[in-house]
Image: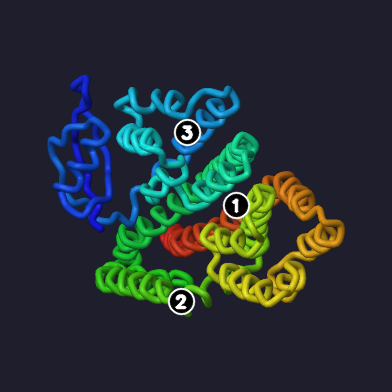
Amino acid sequence: MPRFAYQARDASGRLVRGIELADSEEALDSVLSSSNLCLIEARVQRARRGGRVRAEVLVDFCYHLRSVVEGGIPLIEGLQDFCDDTSHPLNSVMVDVSRKIRNGSQLSEAMAEYPGHFPELMRALIRAGEETGRLDQILRDLVSYLEWRNELAHQIKSALAYPAVVVGGILVLCVILLTYVLPNFMQIFNELDVELPLATVVLLAISDFLRTRGVLLLCALAAGAAGFRILVRTDSGRSLYHALLLRLPLFGNLITMLEMSRFAHNLSILYASGIPIVRAIDLIENIVQNFSIRESLASAQEDIKRGGSLTGALERERWMPTLVTRMLRIGEQTGELDRSLERVSAYYDRELPRVIKKTLAVFNTSSVVCLGGVIGTMALAIFVPVYKMLSSLNTG
């Protein structure tokens, strides 16, 4: 059934935009007429792969929705603010969602029409809240999780900004020294017949290669990058690459902690919301970013379907931290798995910022030392011949 993006006017003449599934434009007109809307324009909307709204917008939406539910305000009335604010990114979506709710749909059903705007996790949680009558509690947990996720992303981006600038600046300086400064000195060295040390000879060879075959090098790097992108798009290539990431000396532990934090946070919210453990793990598979861990979760899900325990299914995985399996085992034995998952989440909330700072501090120091060594070597390769040249002139 095609999806139509339409424009219509209501009884008061106000322009309404939205998206609706219908067999044809005539069927769409009939559906809109039942909602007292007059169809003006409609076009078939192609399925979009992207189009996700910014995380801050989702936090704002969930926070507003939580206030509406906790305040006992009717949902239609609570969503009217988004419908009236034409500059809001969710304006046209909320107009259509509100209309569907007015026609008898649940909020989760209306949101399901917009998978590009609302993540599957959010839709599943809201559906669970509607079914269990705990929508207010679920929205509180969802807001806390989204805020935590955004804060963590901001911390990582801020921490990576400094080393990115330093490494980029030093690489640009190296290219300038090799392609411009060193060749000019080389003319002087040749005229005065200065004996060159090995480091200078090597740098001259690199400089000559960059100036004469730099374009070929760029093409080779571009081809390598394209080949790598093609490789990691395959299941086997992506799995191998992500498995190697988990074994990196410095960042492997950090990546594992990030994924375990996502796992614990989301499983805690989903399980506490009454979603069955098998379905919860199925949802988490789409949230976990490391493909190797995602495959392990799929395997664990199959074990649980065959009657195994969550702990037994996960503790066989080498990447699974002992802390997590120990807490999960305690939760299963006491019947308080949700509380155990909350404790694991609290642990990672406390430890992750510290580990991020420590890891990036080591990385920054190592980068500066290594690149400083490169710059120092290049400086010596240039100035040692200059010193020899000046010494020979003085003695002459």
Q: CA distance from mark 3 to mark 1?
A: 37 Å
Q: Residue at x 46, y 25 (%)?
A: 78
Q: Is residue 317 above or below residue 79?
A: below
Question: Is 325 situated left or right of 23 in this image?
Answer: right
Q: Quadrant of the C terminus?
A: bottom left
Residue for badge 1: 364
Residue for badge 3: 61
Residue found at the far top of this picture? 12
Q: Quadrant of the N terminus?
A: bottom left
Q: Residue at x 39, y 25 (%)?
A: 80
Q: CA distance from mark 3 to mark 2?
A: 35 Å
Coordinates of residue 271 in the picture (x, y in percent): 67, 53
Q: CA distance from mark 1 to mark 2?
A: 33 Å
Which three-letter amino acid code belongs to the residue tagged 1? Asn
Residue for badge 2: 235
Q: Residue at x 78, y 60 (%)?
A: 328
Q: Please say if the residues under marks 1 and 2 sit with CB atoms less than 8 Å apart.
A: no
Q: Residue at x 61, y 42 (%)?
A: 145
What mark, if any, has residue 326 been given in the picture?
A: none
Observer-side mark, 3 or 1, equals 3
Nearer to me, 307 or 54: 307
**Picture quadrant where residue 190 is located:** bottom left
Coordinates of residue 260 in the picture (x, y in percent): 66, 58
Which three-letter amino acid code belongs to the residue tagged 2? Asp
Which three-letter amino acid code belongs to the residue tagged 3? Phe
Question: Is 46 situated left or right of 157 in this image?
Answer: left
Q: Considering only order in the chain, which callout, 1 or 3, is on the residue closer to the N terminus?
A: 3
| Pointer 1 local density, CA inside 10 Å: few below 14, some 14–19, many at least 20 | some
Asked if one can make out residue 374 in the rendered structure from this viewpoint, the answer is yes
